[in-house]
Image (cartoon, rainbow, N blue to C red):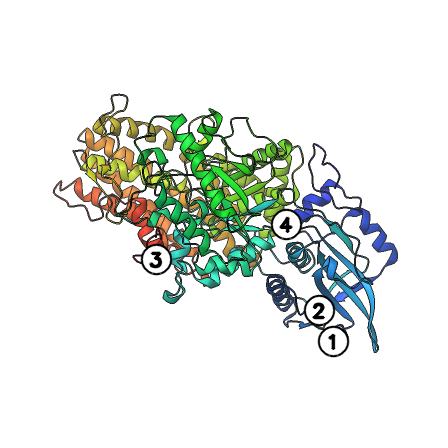
Amino acid sequence: MRQRSLLFTRHLLAVPIMLCWLAAAAFGQSQAPPGRQQKQSERGERLVLSSSLTILENADAPIPIQHSAEDLATDFGKVFGMKPRIVHRQEDAAPLTILIDEQSKLPESVRPIGSADPESFSISVAKADWNKAHATDVIVLSGADMRGTIFAIYEFSQQYLGVDPLYYWTDHEPLRRASVTIPAAINEKFPAPVFKYRGFFINDEDLLTGWAPGEKNDKTGISLEIWDHIFETILRLKGNMVAPGTWIFPDEPQVKDAAQRGLIVTQHHAIPLGLNVARWPKDVAYNYTSSPEFLEQAWKNAVNSYLPDQEVLWSVGLRGLSDVTYASMDPTVRNNNRALGQLISKAIAAQMRIVRSVRPQAQFVTNLWQEGARLVQQGDLKIPPEVATVWADDGYGYLQDNGQVTAGQGIYDHVAMMNGRANQLSEMVPIERSFSEIGRYIKAGATHYYLVNTSDIRPVTMSIRAVMDAVWKGLPSDTSKASSEFYQHWSADEFGDQAAAQLAELYKEYFNAPAHFGEPTHEYGDQLYHTEARRMLLTYMIDAPLYSVPSQAPKWESPRVLLPGAEPNPNRAVGKEWLAQTVTREIQQCSEAQPRWDAVWKKALEIESLVAPSRKAFYQAAVLAMIAINRESNRMLLQVAKAIQDAQTAKMAEARQEAQQALSSFDEIQRAESAAEYGKWKNWYRGDWLTNVYRTRDIVQTFAKFLSDPETRLSPPLIWDGWEAYYHIMHYEGDRSADVN
C-alpha cells in the first residue's frame, strides 16, 4: 500500500475519490463516490434489493462471520419487513444474492481484485451461472481476512440499507421500504484501517450495570444480551478490540463471547495480563519487591484463564491495587523514580516470559497512565522494543506524551471519565480536541493502537462515532474543518436536515458553556458539580477532619482523610480555609457559566421543533437531557456555594432560600432524566452511582434542614466513595479473589 500523504486521509483504492465524498461516507450517507457515480449512471443498470434475495454464506465460515451475516439478515428484516433466507449452497441462491466470504475462499469467477492488507475489504457485483434455471446477480461482500469480511457486511448495511452503526444506542432504526435500488456496477475497495487496533474500554460501567444487570448464573455484571450489542456496535464502527469491563476476571462469559464475535480482547492498564487486582486476596502480600512469587503466579493463572485460541492483545505493566501507583504500596520504591521504573521493567519482562511460554507469538502493549508517562519521559522507565507504547490522555482529551510521540505508538483516550470531576452522564470532550490529537498521532505514524474509554456508551454516542470513524479512515490535515463537518453530518443523520445547521452550531456552544480550570482548558464535567457540592457541604456541616474507610472498600484499603484539606500539608488550605476559597471560586466560575448554559438551553428548545418527528425522543435523551444535567448542576453548585457563604455570615434566611433553589435544580434534572428513560431505557439512571445525583440531593436536603437545626443527622454512607459504587458494579463476583496459588 502506498505511503499516505500528510493529508493522511483514507482513500479508496482503484477509484478516484474526492475528500467531500469521504466526509459523507464517514457519516452514513448512502451516496457513491463522484468518480464512480458517473460511470454507473452511463450504464443505467440497477439492482433491486428486497427480502426475496438470499444471503449465501460458506457453511464453514467462522462463527463471527456467521453472527454478522445474521445481523445483515436482521437489518434486511427491519427495512423490508421480512428477513431473507441464509443459504449455504450455490444452487439454492436466488436470482439476486449476497455472497459473504473471505476473498481467498471465493469462487474465482466472482472474486474481486482486492487488497491483501489485514482488515481491508470490498463490495462488488458480479454475474454467476450457478443455477440452470436463472442467471444470478451476486453482491460480493468480502475481506482480506475474517474481520475484513465482517466490516464489508456492516459497511454494506450502513451505506445501502441506511443502518446506523450505533442504532442500538441512538434508537435510530432504518426506514421501512418495499425495495431499495443500488447501482449494478459497484466496485468499492476499502484499504486497511489507519490504526491497527481500535476498540472500546467499557469502564466504570455503573449505568449499564444498574440498567441491565447480568443474570445470577451468568456471572457477569451486565446482561450478556447487552454485551452482544456492545460487541456488535464495535464491529459496525470497524473496531476490532475490546476491554470488556473494569475489575473483571479473564474467564467471565463476556470475554469468551467477544471472541465469538471476532473481537480481540485486551486489558486496561490496571489489570495487566487480566489479573483482577481489585480482588487481590486480603492476606497475601502485594509486593513485587519482597514477594514477587505471588504476583508471578497470579499472572500465570490469569493468562491460563483465557481460552487457548482466544485472540488477546496483552497489556503489561505494574500498578498498585485499585488503579493507584505501585509506589504507594511499596516503601522501597516510594519517592524513588528510578527504582520504581526498574521494578516496573522487571515486572514487564516477567509478564512477557509468562505469556510467551504458552503463546510464543503474543503481541504486547503498555498503557502509560499517569505516572507511567512521567517515568518514560524522565528516562526512568524503559519499554522493551517488542512492546508498543501507548500514551494516555488525562481524561479531558489531552494526550500526555509531551511531544515525545513516535511512529508505532498508540493512544488510550477518554470520551467519558470517572475521576470525580469529568463526565459520566453527558458529553464533555469537544470533537475539535479529539480530532486534533488523533490527527497529531496519525501525522507521527503512531497508529498502532487506539482504545477509547466509553464508560456506559449511551451518554457519549456522538464522541464515540467521531473518534471511531477517525481511527478507521483517517482525518484531513485541517482537523478543525473536519470537526465542523462532523457536527453537521451527525446532526443531519441523527436529527434531520432541517435541524442540522443550527444543531451543529449548538454543539460548539455546548462544549464552550462549562466553567473550566487549568491550562490547557479542562471543562467542568457533570461529576465535578456533584463531587464539589458534597465536599463543600460536608466540610461546612462537619467541623473536624474525618478519617475513615468507605464501607465497601477492599480490606487492603488504608484509612485516609476524607474531607478536603485536612492533611497536615503546609502548602494546602485546610478545613474552613479551603471551604472559603472554594465557595468564592465556585460562585465566580458558576456565575460566569450560567448565562452560557441558559443560552444553550434556550437554543436547544428552539431547535426541537426542527427535529424530525421520529427522532424527537433521542433528541430528548442526547441533547435536552445532556444540557439539562449540566445546566442545572451548574446552577445547583452556584446556589450551594452562595448558601454556604451566606450561612457563614449569619444570613440564614438567604441561605435557606438558596438551598431551596438548589433543590429545585434537582427537580429539573429528574424531569430531564425521566424523559430520557423511554421504552427500553426505563431505569437507565438507576445505576448512577458514580456521579450520583441522588446522593448529592440527599446531602443538600440535609443541609437545608441543618440551617434550621444543627442537630440534623447525616444519612449513611457519610462519604460516597468510588468503592461504594463498585460494590454494586462488582456485586456479581461475590467473595471471589484473584487466584495466587
Q: Is residue 470 above or below residue 569?
A: below
Q: Amino acid at mark 1?
A: Asp
Where residue 264 appears, x then y in whole percent?
A: 55, 52
Give the mark nearer the N terminus: 1 vs 4: 1
Give SS at disc 1: helix
Q: Amino acid at mark 2?
A: Leu
Crowdedness of circle 2 by 10 Å Cα count: few (<14), some, many (20+)?
A: many
Q: Report the residue that reaches farthest toward the right.
A: 42
Give SS at disc 3: helix
Where residue 695 appears, x then y in whole percent?
A: 28, 48
Residue that carries the numbered disc 2 in the rendered image: 56
Q: CA distance from mark 1 to mark 4?
A: 42 Å
Q: Which mark's residue is nearer the viewer, 3 or 2?
A: 3
Residue that carries the numbered disc 1 in the rendered image: 92
Res 641 quadrant in image: top left
Asked if the residues shown at circle 4 and circle 2 are in contact, with their CB atoms under 8 angstroms apart, the answer is no
Where residue 532 appears, x then y in whole percent?
A: 31, 37
Give SS at disc 4: helix
Q: Report the residue that reaches farthest toward the top.
A: 570
Asked if the residues shown at circle 2 and circle 1 are in contact, with their CB atoms under 8 angstroms apart, the answer is yes
Residue that carries the numbered disc 4 in the rendered image: 497
Give the mark nearer the N terminus: 4 vs 2: 2
Res 433 quadrant in image: top right
Q: CA distance from mark 4 to mark 2?
A: 36 Å
Q: Report the residue that reaches farthest toward the bottom.
A: 133
Residue that carries the numbered disc 3 in the rendered image: 733
Q: Amino acid at mark 3?
A: Glu
Crowdedness of circle 4 by 10 Å Cα count: few (<14), some, many (20+)?
A: some
